[in-house]
Amino acid sequence: MTALDTFQGRPCLWLPVLLLLGSGHIPGVTGETHYQPGDPVMLYVNKVGPYHNPQETYHYYQLPVCCPEKIRHKSLSLGEVLDGDRMAESMYQIRFRENVEKRTLCQMQLTFAQVERLRQAIEELYYFEFVVDDLPIRGFVGYMEESGFLPHSHKIGLWTHLDFHLEFHGDRIVFANVSVRDVKPHSLDVVRPEEPLDLTHTYSVHWSETSAERRGDRRHGDDGGFFPRTLEIHWLSIINSMVLVFLLVGFVAVILMRVLRNDLARYNLDEEPNSGSSTDDFDQGDNGWKIIHTDVFRFPPCRGLLCAVLGVGTQFLALGTGIIVMALLGMFNVHRHGAINSAAILLYALTCCIAGYVSSHFYRQIGGERWVWNIILTTSLFSVPFFLTWSVVNSVHWANGSTQALPATTILLLLTVWLLVGFPLTVIGGIFGKNNATPFDAPCRTKNIAREIPPQPWYKSTVVHMTIGGFLPFSAISVELYYIFATVWGREQYTLYGILFFVFAILLSVGACISIALTYFQLSGEDYRWWWRSVLSVGSTGLFIFFYSVFYYARRSNMSGAVQTVEFFGYSFLTAYVFFLMLGTISFFSSLKFIRYIYVNLKMD
């Protein structure tokens, strides 16, 4: 059972409480307990899993270890459940400021199958996580040593004694760690199938006073060096991104605008002597992007799908910006990945109104009539692929007994939040967008008969534009992308949200600049089909991100196994899809603004 179950039957309380749980700030709750000497200190066992597979975790009691007769679980927040935590009371007896020397925890007789289960876990570098007073304690389940080639040595041992080190300041615990220093592992190499293995698990507790008054946040952060330290500022990524964005902005602002100025001067000068002639006569002696002024604002096919892409893309732009700004303002603890996940879920539900408004507003502007279908398409454009991907990933976790599989109560809660918050806000936003829509007001009149598009050279094809438009924004974030992957799919801790916000702004700027340049080249070839081309050109950055995820999995990580592989590629696909929607939206609106600008400044009959 989780803390979420407390609010069953009272849906009106869910949203504010979940916001507090997801943000990590509950008024009046600090996460620290005040103790008196001799007070019991509860140590919770949490999860185990392969060190190199961060998302593959299992309940600690799934291993053949000391376990109480009745397992009592701790109530968890939404963020902890999403992070795979499943805390349960342990058999360790710890009292505040009372040292313990080699106390027996339990005595066990393991069957050969249980010993093989432990051997397999140790060979896969399983680590365990305990929690005491909201502080993590992590260590490896056993010891493995391989040495030599001829003769080859392969030794496996189980840590049967744990030494807990706790530091206190006044009446509060500020640090906790576990050590196996000077402890000899129990060998699992000579175990006969017909004989059970007798084990005695023991532990020691050592208290020491410290001058540190604050623990900081150690729940998913500094735990004595078991996981790598927080990433430092990476200047190479920043310099690389800045150089690229300056070059692109300079290209668009200087070269492209000079070309446009010359085009506008030539077209307007050529038109003055022919001001009395008809538009058709003028078209016959002209070429370039002006000749398609009667077709450039011709509405595209699949306009409902295009508007849904723009609506959901705008929603994720607001969502991404909101998450980074919240982190910069300290609105949730940046070390708690689960809290960030829960905050993202809630922000997604709340920003659904943006998707509905933008999609329905633009759909009505370009002459769409089936606005109900447009709203349904908008609300399904991301939620359906996400649900299908999540269903596969969650089923694999469930089949393997992983704690990353969400409980039924949490699934129902998240579904209810979407049904009661996300979907209604999409509909409300769609209604407001439809009612507030103004005419498209194109600068040029569109003819009834479309102009024939001349054959285009290969370098103006959609594939080439997607390659250029996707590679340049990707190169601006390629270095930073490694650190983000190392955080999400590794053991690093990312706290440089100021740098992340800066790189995010650079990504959007590069996408807008390259979109304008590619759109100009397309229009110069008398090809007026820019609507979908602008979305695909820069939106293809998502493809490069997915290809990078494949490279990262194969060359930059030690992940393995079906559980971790399915989760990695499933959510990497969704990440690439989100970037396609965001950057495609930025690209489209940049191109639309640019096209309006050049045709407004063009003199025409």
Image (spheres, rainbow, N blue to C red):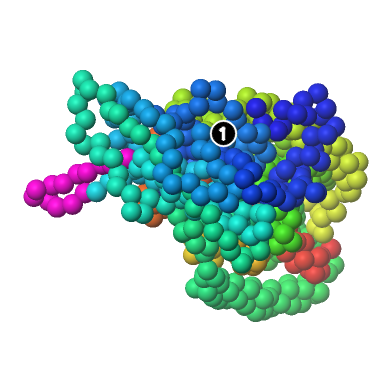
Is 514 part of what is drawn in magenta?
A: no
Q: In this view, does 6 lie to the left or right of 228?
A: right
| Element marked by disc 1 | strand
Identify the residue at horizontal 60%, vertical 76% (top origin). 246
Residue type, label 1:
Glu
Query: How many numbered badges does the structure rendering display?
Result: 1
Crowding around mark 1 (Cα neighbors within 10 Å: few <14, some 14 to 19, many 20+) is: some
Q: What stretch is highlighted in magenta?
A: 146-158
Q: Main secondary structure of the magenta part?
A: strand
Left or right? Give the position of 399 relative to 134. Answer: left
Q: Is residue 589 visible?
A: no
Q: Does the magenta stretch include residue 151?
A: yes
Q: Residue furthest left?
A: 150
Q: Nearer the viewer, residue 140 or 432?
A: 140
Q: Is residue 68 above or below residue 465?
A: above
Residue 473 screen position, x and y as percent: 56, 62
Residue 136 in sight in this render: yes
Name above or below for residue 555 compared with residue 383.
Answer: below
Give percent across and percent down for residue 142.
34, 43
Q: Is residue 347 above or below residue 113?
A: below
Residue found at the very far top of the displayed protein: 194
Residue located at (85% from left, 32% from top):
12
Q: Which residue is drawn at 86% across and 37% down?
A: 428
Q: In this view, does 49 lie to the left or right of 418?
A: left
Look at mark 1 in the image and give the residue it sits on.
89
Residue in the image at 35% along x and 37% along y: 121
Picture coordinates of residue 405, whole percent (x, y): 54, 31
Position of residue 145 measured from the top left corner of the image (x, y, whole percent): 24, 48
| Quadrant in the picture for residue 507 | bottom right
Quadrant occupied by the C terminus: bottom right
Image quadrant where one finds the N terminus: top right
